[in-house]
Image (cartoon, grey):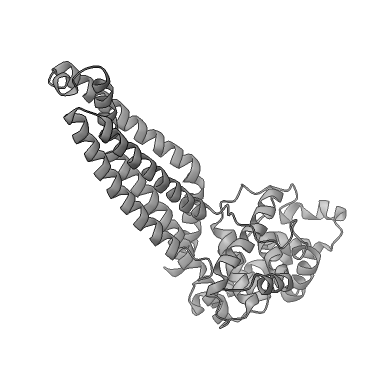
Amino acid sequence: MDLTEAWKKLESDKLSKPVAGSVHIQKTSKHPVQKLILLFKVTLGFAIFFELGFIYLFAIMPQLIVKVFLVIMIITYAFFFLLNYKVLRKIKHSFRLDLSLKNTLKQVYDNTMSTLAFQRKASLIIYPLAATAGFLMGLAAEKDAAMMMQKWQVQLILLIAIIILTPSCYYLARWMEKVSYGKYLHQLRDLIAQFDKEEV
Amino acid sequence: MASEKEFTLLIEQNRGIIFKVIRLYVNHEEDERDLFQEVLFQAWRSYPNFKGQAKFSTWLYRVGLNTVLTFKRKPQLVVPHDNLSTLKASVEEKNYPEETEALYIAIRELNEIDRMVISLHLDGYENEEVAEISGLTKNNVAVKLHRIKETLTKKLKDY
């Protein structure tokens, strides 16, 4: 069988069969990297929302210890907002599907991995701080938070809350990450390995 | 700003390339529809970078392959006769010749990178162009092609 001839037949018999859908450019994408970009934008939106919330709470909360923690939260969120924005710009700039396949695969894989790793690291700092700020605000609603925090029982409760909440949230996020991106990353790794295997 | 009308016209003229790339990698109806729209979206997004150094068809082939291979695809449907050894028994139900189906199955049995290399080659692209599209070296493309052709010929000869 002549391959070129058979290919021509295959093209006309099977490969050129139209796929459903008209030539209409949609404004949304289902590409995983495009979804990551959207996720970053949503995260940035939430960061602004929380910053405004913290500023409002700072203005209305009378107790100094709560204000100090709110300032820490405001600074932390501002820092992560800037980092998120930097990573988002990098991904948006480097995500191109009109370059060679090998480069594209490596870039998409690296971008996805570094984004997920960044979110994981950020969460390890955000969760304990958020738990502490929430705890203090809860105390301040009823009593003098600074006084209450001097009791070892209260400190212990806060410590236990942090010890339980931080790893739980971290591993829950990792599990969700695995469900959402696990198979996809495996697919990309397989393709990159096919390239690398040939070059040894 | 690139004209949407001009872009749509170019896509209309070359949309067979998109169909071909999708059919080479996907046999899941929902994925096919999603990927068709996704390739259009990505091509439109990248169109301002198209400077005309390559032909539009070559550029679209590249965007199509990159999009399909970096898309989160569903597990592919396994057709009962999707194997050369069981093809003969079921091919009478098809409207197209046995050898066409045999080549299609043989190509689908290759790994995804090999599938890309052989389809570009059989479409008449020079090794240098295949290397540019894939990111492989020219020598690597030549070696791969030799091996893929041997594999395909052997499979189809047995058939």
Regarding residue B7, the answer to whether it shows in the image is: yes
Q: Going 61% across and 47% down the picture, which residue do you hit? A: B74
Quadrant (top left, top right, bottom left, bottom right) of the N terminus of chain B: bottom right
Question: Where B73 sits versus B8, above or below?
Answer: above
Left or right: where does residue B99 sit relative to residue B57? right
Left or right: where does residue A97 sit relative to residue B107? left
- Residue B133 location (% of width, % of height): 55, 73
- Residue B142 location (% of width, % of height): 55, 78
Left or right: where does residue A42 sit relative to residue B133? left
Quadrant (top left, top right, bottom left, bottom right) of the C terminus of chain B: bottom right
Nearer the observer, A140 or A28: A140
Q: Which residue lies furthest to the left in this view?
A: A150
- Residue B29 location (% of width, % of height): 71, 50
Nearer the observer, B16 or B75: B16
Q: Going 49% across and 55% down the picture, which residue do you hit? A: A188
- How many labels were placed on the picture? 0
Nearer the observer, A155 or B141: A155
Left or right: where does residue A187 sit relative to residue B101? left
- Residue B26 location (% of width, % of height): 66, 55
The part of the image, by quadrant, that contains residue A178 is: top left
Regarding residue B114, the answer to whether it shows in the image is: no
Q: Going 35% across and 30% down the picture, which residue do you hit? A: A168
The part of the image, by quadrant, that contains residue A43 is: top left
Q: Going 44% across and 69% down the picture, which residue do you hit? A: A199
Q: Which residue lies furthest to the bottom in this view?
A: B53
